[in-house]
Image: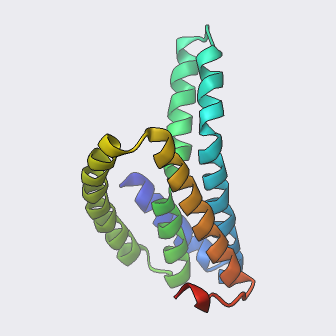
Amino acid sequence: MILQSLAAALGEKIGSLIPENYLQLGVGILFISFGIWSFRKDENEEKAKDIKEKSAFKIVLTIALLFFLAELGDKTQLATFSLAAKYNSFWQVFAGSALGLLAADIIAILAGVYLGKKLPRRKIRYISAGAFILFGAIILGKVFLIPLSFLL
């Protein structure tokens, strides 16, 4: 909830300062970046296994920072940010995003349990990464006025 309110507040403020096309350009780039980062996650996990000694403080700080950044860059945060920027309305966007997040979490947990039993984790990661890249490309296509009627 804290990150939802932060995304709504920042989106509302920045939305009044930055034109929508520039915001959408940023969101599209972030979606594509998140997808690429998801593809590279396997490499990062292998490197993390090689690390033998770190101080407890550095480990806790690193985990906390990565968790915060991963959640802030989540698609729900990006959507909340861009909607608050577009409509300049903190409370409505916050309420809608918080309720939507709750509903989506329930569905995701149930679907995740089911798919986790049916598909390997790596395949799920690749499908998710591909979806982020696809949606980022669609957003960028809209920014650059490429007709997307063939998708309908």
Q: Residue furthest top?
A: 53
Which residue corresponds to the image point at 32% horizontal and 67% vertical from the top-left? 100
Of residues 65 and 148, the one drawn nearer to the viewer in this rendering: 148
Total numbered circles:
0
Whether residue 73 is visible to the viewer of this picture, yes or no, is: no
Q: Quadrant of residue 90?
A: bottom left
Q: Estimate the x, y position of residue 148 in percent, counting from the top left.
A: 63, 87
Describe the colour scheme in one phrase.
rainbow
Q: Is residue 148 above or below residue 137?
A: below
Q: Is residue 89 above or below residue 132?
A: below
Picture quarter with the N terminus: bottom left
Describe residue 22's horizontal placement relative to residue 72 as left or right. right
Of residues 42 and 66, the one drawn nearer to the viewer in this rendering: 42
Q: Is residue 149 above or below residue 131?
A: below
Which residue corresponds to the image point at 44% horizontal and 79% vertical from the top-left? 89
Q: Estimate the x, y position of residue 14 in percent, counting from the top left.
A: 62, 72
Whether residue 95 is visible to the viewer of this picture, yes or no, is: yes
Describe residue 115's horizontal placement relative to residue 46 as left or right. left
Of residues 124 and 70, the one drawn nearer to the viewer in this rendering: 124
Which residue corresponds to the image point at 37% horizontal and 74% vertical from the top-left? 91
Q: Estimate the x, y position of residue 140 in percent, counting from the top left.
A: 69, 75
Q: Estimate the x, y position of residue 145 in percent, counting from the top left.
A: 72, 88
Which residue corresponds to the image point at 66% horizontal and 83% vertical from the top-left? 142
Of residues 114 and 10, the one drawn nearer to the viewer in this rendering: 114
